[in-house]
Structure formats: C-alpha cells, structure tokens
Amino acid sequence: AANALGAAESLSNYGKDEFTIIDIITKPGVRAVSEEACTDVILILDDGNCLFSQSVGILNSVIFMAASLGKDKIHRGVRVKLTEITTRGGNTMKQLKILGFAS
C-alpha cells in the first residue's frame, strides 16, 4: 500500500481504458492548481500498476463498488472500463463501468 501511494500513475495518462482492480485506497488530498480539498483515489491493478485520480466521478464509482461488492470480491479482481460522460452543464465526468470479475 505504501508503494501504491508514492508510485501511482495518473489514470488520465495510463493509456488503457480496460483493467482489473484488486484494491482501492482513498485518502484526503488537495488539488494542485486550485488548492481545493478533494479525495485521492488509488486503484491497485492485478498487473502491479497503481493508478491515481482526483476525479469525483471515479470516487463515486469506487464508493459504489465498495458498497455493492465488498472488499472480498474486489480483492479477487473487478474488470472495469474507464468511460467519460458529458453532464447537462457540458462538463465531462469519468466513471468506471464494471465489465465482470476475475475468475
């Protein structure tokens, strides 16, 4: 977990839109540009990579995953796809869509 916090790659720069999550870490954070408080989300993947996001949409996705699936199912692997939607106000929001589960 300590390595994940220090070496996570930006989700926006990852280059793959489908991956398998085996753990999720959240912690209080601060946005670099606006200095506003936010929540840092670190996704630990089955291939050893760790991804970092401050997206509210990603946070909402992982809260839903944790509440509906529980830690045990997430630890076995949840295959997801990174998607982006446009809100009514014209902003974009990232989301994680569950595709399936590791066998």
Image (tube, rainbow, N blue to C red):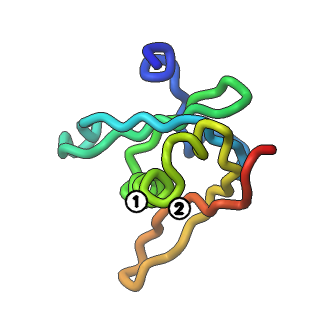
Q: Position of residue 9 (x, y in %)?
A: 55, 30
- Placement of 94 over or under 75, stated as above or below: below
Of the pair 102 and 21, the residue shown nearer to us: 102
Give the vertical position of 64 relative to 43 (above or below). Answer: below
Residue pointed to by mark 1: 60
Q: Are marks 2 and 1 in contact (CB under 8 Å)?
A: yes
The residue positioned 64% from the left and 27% from the top of the image is 49
Amino acid bearing label 2: Gln
Q: x, y (%) of residue 90?
A: 42, 79
Q: Dot 2: what SS?
A: strand
What residue type is disc 1 on? Answer: Asn
| Side of 45 relative to 95 (left or right) | right
Task: Say the numbered circle drawn on residue 52.
Answer: none
Mark 1 lies on a secondary structure that is helix
User: Residue 64's spot in the image, x, y percent?
Assistant: 45, 60
Residue 83 location (% of width, % of height): 61, 63
Circle 1 residues within 10 Å: few <14, some 14–19, many ≥20: few
